[in-house]
Image: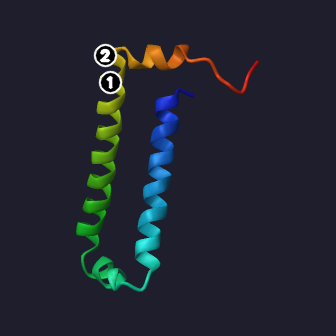
Amino acid sequence: MRPVFKIIIIYELFFFIFWNILYFSSSDIENWFETKILSAIYIILSTMALGISLVYVVYISAKLTGMLDKIKTIKDPRKN
């Protein structure tokens, strides 16, 4: 599995947990979810899409500037 996909999966899990915490907290957000479920789904999905596009922009920028090559050449201090 490519590292980008691992980042995306971690990102998706983070937002899933984040929205569950918001939903089950006592901040009256559950009433908003019940009354405007389509708006809630749109906001969740658009937030996740925005985050994914941000990750891709950072990744592509690092790749184009050559930072990824520099990071790959750094020796791992844990290994001898």
What's the mark number on residue 64?
2
Question: For this rendering, which residue is in front, 64 or 14?
Answer: 64
Please report the residue visible at 30 percent of the width from the left and 39 percent of the height from the top.
54
Please report the residue visible at 42 percent of the width from the left and 57 percent of the height from the top.
15
Which residue is farthest right? 80
Is residue 31 positioned above or below 23 on the image?
A: below
Quick check: 31 left or right of 12? left
Whole-percent x, y for residue 18 in the image: 44, 64
Question: For this rendering, which residue is in front, 32 or 77?
Answer: 77
Is residue 75 positioned above or below 20 on the image?
A: above
Q: Residues within 10 Å of mark 1 (few under 14, many from 20)?
A: few
What's the mark number on residue 33?
none
**Element class at badge 1:** helix
Residue wearing tag 1: 60
Q: Residues within 10 Å of mark 2 (few under 14, many from 20)?
A: few
Quick check: 31 left or right of 69? left
Whole-percent x, y for residue 29 in the image: 33, 80
Q: Amino acid at mark 1?
A: Ile
Please report the residue visible at 46 percent of the width from the left and 72 percent of the height from the top.
21
Give the alpha-carbon distance from disc 1 to disc 2, as whole Å: 6 Å
**Element class at badge 2:** helix
Q: Amino acid at mark 2?
A: Leu
Please report the residue visible at 35 percent of the width from the left and 37 percent of the height from the top.
55
Q: Are marks 1 and 2 in contact (CB under 8 Å)?
A: yes
